[in-house]
């Protein structure tokens, strides 16, 4: 009976460990958008998933220049949309793997300086990429 009392907790701990390991999803399948602290540049990665991330960025100018690139062998798209401090869309660019160029540089339309909103959308994205926003252009 004492052996049973000792074995039962060990079996229970083992089962909990197995359940925990098998119930967690593979985090590598989740696309990620990582924005650096200043909000003016960042990186994206993904293994086929879709996600959207939004952050604010202080732009003291009326325009911004966007540089973005992607490396993707299996498809997907990487979109950056920028709105000025009044909420007006001043830039909307997309790179799609296997279609056209894999990098671009664009100057935004004029907007109101202040806190700008940057929305990054990865759709069926498989690969990695980066973006940089510069004040003015």
Image (spheres, grey):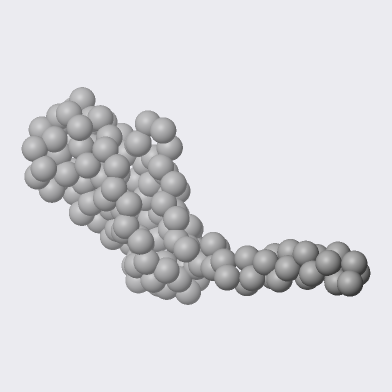
Residue occupying the point 32% across, 57% down: 52
Q: Nearer the viewer, residue 14 or 113?
A: 14
User: Percent x, y for residue 132?
Assistant: 37, 41
Residue occupying the point 40% across, 60% down: 102
Vertical arrangement, residue 73 with respect to residue 120, above or below:
below
In screen coordinates, is 6 left or right of 67? right
In screen coordinates, is 51 left or right of 81? right
Residue 57, quarter of the rendered image: top left
Vertical arrangement, residue 4 with respect to residue 94, above or below:
below
Residue occupying the point 26% across, 45% down: 118
Q: Is residue 26 something one can see in this rendering?
A: no
In screen coordinates, is 116 left or right of 127? left
User: Percent x, y for residue 76?
Assistant: 39, 70
Vertical arrangement, residue 35 with respect to residue 103, above or below:
above
User: Percent x, y for residue 35?
Assistant: 41, 42
Q: Nearer the viewer, residue 119 or 1?
A: 1
Q: Quadrant of the N terminus?
A: bottom right
């Amino acid at each position: 009976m004492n052996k049973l009392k000792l074995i039962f907790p060990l079996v229970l701990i083992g089962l909990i460990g197995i359940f925990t390991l098998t119930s967690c999803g593979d985090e590598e399948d989740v696309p990620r958008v990582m924005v650096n602290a200043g909000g003016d540049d960042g990186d994206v990665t993904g293994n086929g998933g879709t996600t959207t991330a939004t952050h604010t960025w202080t732009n003291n100018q009326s325009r911004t220049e966007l540089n973005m690139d992607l490396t993707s062998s299996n498809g997907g798209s990487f979109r950056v949309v920028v709105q000025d401090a009044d909420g007006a869309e001043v830039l909307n660019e997309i790179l799609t793997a296997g279609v056209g160029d894999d990098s671009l540089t664009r100057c935004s339309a004029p907007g109101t300086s202040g806190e700008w909103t940057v929305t990054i959308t990865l759709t069926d994205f498989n690969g990695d990429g980066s973006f940089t926003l510069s004040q003015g252009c």
